[in-house]
Image (spheres, rainbow, N blue to C red):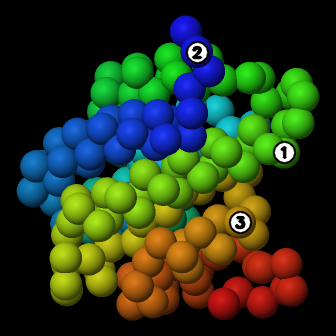
């Protein structure tokens, strides 16, 4: 197999995430947080989400509100991401060669995928979209999560997240 391009990675993530998020939204719950999660080593992504209904049933709503790992929808639709994982592992290992370039390529694919999904109204439009925060989050969290959240969202959808969960930017501010 040839080394997959950033476009091929993006296309695969769009296909997998669109299917998974649409299945998630079919539950009828009201979601306010939908993200792709990856690690600091840019391993293959998976989704996490919170709805108002699931938060009402959470053990500690104040701690769980933005915590991907506490989400009852952690890795939802993982079966749709098998092609993504295959392409991801066909890329050079992140710890070989120019690891920064490879990391940036993978993050570009993930952010581009979320932008395309948003443009296709997968996350809703108008008022509905303003009530839903989307992101590509790296764990453990760092300032780039905040930078991506600002690029990916209308300001109205991230006001509460910025106040409660955002990592400070490089200059020490939180947007």
Residue 97, placed above or below residue 158: above
| Residue that protrudes farthest toward the top in the picture | 1
Residue 6, placed above or below residue 44: below
Mark 2 closeness class: few <14, some 14–19, many ≥20 residues within 10 Å: few
Q: Quadrant of residue 18?
A: top left
Of callouts 2 and 3, the N-terminal one: 2
In the displayed structure image, the side of residue 146 where residue 33 appears, left or right: left
The mark lying in front, picked from 1 and 2, is 2
Which one is in front, 10 or 144? 10
Q: For the point 39% across and 34% down, which residue is it?
A: 12
x then y, percent, for residue 28? 9, 56
The mark lying in front, picked from 2 and 3, is 2
x then y, percent, for residue 65? 46, 66
Quadrant position of the C terminus in the picture: bottom right
The mark lying in front, picked from 3 and 1, is 1
State the residue position of label 3. 144
In the displayed structure image, the side of residue 11 where residue 95 appears, left or right: right
**Residue 65 makes an appearance in the image:** no
Which one is in front, 141 or 150? 150
x then y, percent, for residue 95? 86, 27
- How much space separates mark 2 and mark 3, taking CA atoms? 30 Å
Q: For the point 85% across and 86% down, which residue is it?
A: 172
Dots 1 and 2: beta carbons under 8 Å? no
């Amino acid at each position: 197999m040839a080394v997959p391009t950033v476009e091929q990675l993006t296309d695969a993530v769009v296909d997998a995430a669109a299917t998974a998020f649409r299945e998630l939204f079919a539950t009828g719950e009201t979601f306010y947080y939908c993200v792709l999660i990856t690690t600091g080593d840019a391993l293959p992504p998976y989704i996490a989400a919170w709805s108002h209904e699931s938060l009402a049933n959470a053990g500690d709503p104040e701690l769980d509100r933005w915590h991907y790992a506490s989400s009852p929808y952690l890795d939802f639709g993982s079966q749709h991401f098998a092609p993504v994982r295959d392409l991801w592992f066909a890329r050079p290992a992140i710890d070989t060669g120019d690891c920064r370039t490879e990391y940036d390529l993978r993050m570009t694919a993930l952010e581009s995928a979320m932008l395309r999904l948003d443009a296709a109204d997968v996350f809703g439009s108008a008022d509905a979209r303003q009530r839903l925060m989307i992101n590509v989050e790296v764990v453990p969290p760092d300032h780039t999560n905040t930078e991506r959240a600002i690029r990916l969202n209308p300001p109205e959808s991230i006001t509460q997240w910025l106040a409660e969960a955002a990592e400070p930017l490089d200059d020490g501010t939180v947007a």
